[in-house]
Image: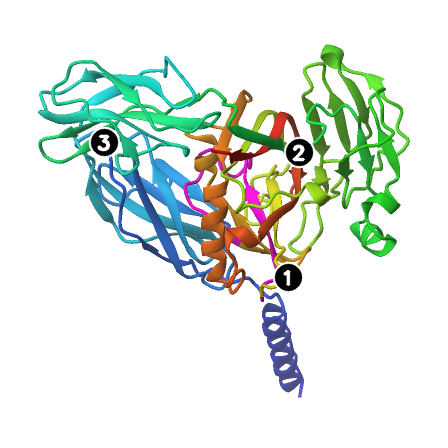
Amino acid sequence: MKSGIMNILKLLVLIMVLLSCKNENIPATVVATVETLSITSITGSTALGGGEIISDGGNSISTRGICWDTIMDPTDGGAKSVDSSGLDKYTSELSGLAGGTTYYVRAFAINNGGIAYGNNEVFTTLFVPLLTTNNATEITNTSATSGGVITESYGIQIIAKGVCWSQNFNPSIEDSKTSDGPGDSPFSSLITGLLPGTAYHVRSYVITSEGNTGYGGDKVFITQSSDSVVYTEVIRDIQFEKGFALTPLDPAIVQQGGGFEKTFLDTLDFGKDGSHPVWILAQWNSKYDLAHTTPINGINGSIEYANEGKKIALFPDHSLWLEVDASKEYESPRLNGQSWPHLLISQNFHDESPNVGEADHLDFSMEIKLEKCENKMTARTYNPSIHTAQSPFYFMLVNNNKNSVDYHQRIWFGLPSFDFRYPILRYNEVVLWDIGTSTFIYGVPENTIWGNVSLHDENWHKTRIDIKPLIKRALEAMKEHDVFKNTTLDDIIITSMNFGWEVPGTFDAAIRVKGIRLKSVKITQ
């Protein structure tokens, strides 16, 4: 009997152990499956690669990208480019490559199960001469002079050279170009047929006897204005002289209370005329309210409003400091689905909303400078698929044609800037769904806006670009998502903008901005 009781007790203990193990709900440790895409856009120093997530292994992808080396099976411990998380195809740039060199590329993806690699793709960079681009001189309203210097020919025969130009970053020989003959001697190029008062990008180029093309660096110049050009500035109070109307912390209060004009809490006027502010300062989902904060004198002559979670300051050079200290907002790292603090400057254009189709150009410009971005999470708790600090710029595009079947359809048109996750600016456009506003977001590739720079370097960076062609591309992309399927540029107006911090992670971050402009340009003859 005693032996039987002991056997029963042992069986019960075994059952309890098995049940306890089953209830632990141990997460799966299956790695993802990823495929490396073919390499394209190969030059002497860059190329485009990418990957596709075939399976996430039952775990969310925290990091994905490509890595490369001159030997097979490169790993993420060497040269790599990190892209956004997700399950779709993605494109990444390979940069800093040596000319005439064979490289191996693999896509990679990281989830809770570890890192997975795709197949090896192999390619060889072009072996092309090195050259520089001359700064533009003799600039008129319709012409300019540039050129280039070939600093190293490597003995390669050059059959053609010149400069190419367009209104977008990194023009190619597929755009407008000059033809300045063969050979490796320095050359001067006359650029003609330009529009007055317009920003252009120019690059020198060479074509070798093997049919390869090399480029110099990108240079920017602005043609002189003309009486035949009419500029309309869309964004008002570009120097922030009239202050900011401050929103409540909860966006639902604005929606239920009849809009910004009826629900704003205070005006932050920096000691100036704040009687009729055109700017709105949105402080969504924060614990700390800036309303009725006493302004103080800050560094370098600035006037600032601050509390434990954020700060806004205006400097004598009319630059604006925006800071979110999310270490005060989060008690622990943010969970997926949890809201996050915003600090956004925004403006509604109302009757001044420009029609995209009627404008010959939409000349957008701004300057930004990262002041700080400190990750307060540990390597274990930081998850780049849900944690970052970013400062995107958005315009709202709306179909305003009452006779169109797409009337009132809208999207956020994004001009991304700083994002903690991407020290290397991306070349791929992004289409996302914004749950908060039930609206699609189209994101322009960052490199198209800012060029080959790092927005992490805490220096001032400036962009000036015609966004009309980019809006045209956005409409084409949105048709694939059943939005704007029957819409033309003539149907679209730009109704508002916003810029600033969205911080869905424990980061203390600050940025300065100035010179935000959007000029609708009309050529009258």
> For the stretch drawn in magenta, what is the main secondary structure?
loop
Q: What kind of element bears circle 3?
A: loop
x then y, percent, for residue 61: 49, 54
In-front residue for pair 367/288: 367
- Label 2: which residue? 235
Quarter assignment of residue 294: top right
- Disc nearer the start of the sequence (1/3): 3
In-front residue for pair 255/460: 255
- Label 3: which residue? 44
Q: Which residues lie in the magenta part?
A: 405-431
Determine contact: label 2, label 3, CB under 8 Å.
no
* Residue at image point 80% right, 28% down: 243
In-front residue for pair 458/22: 458
Q: Real-space Cα distance between discs 2 and 3?
A: 41 Å
Based on the picture, tell me whether residue 421 belongs to the magenta stretch.
yes
- Disc nearer the start of the sequence (2/3): 3
The answer to whether residue 6 shows anywhere in this view is: yes
Above or below, 483 relative to 159: below
Q: What kind of element bears circle 1?
A: loop
Q: Closer to the observer: label 1 or label 3?
A: 1
| Residue sticking out furthest to the top | 300
Q: Real-space Cα distance between discs 2 and 1?
A: 25 Å
- Label 1: which residue? 402
Amino acid under label 3? Answer: Gly
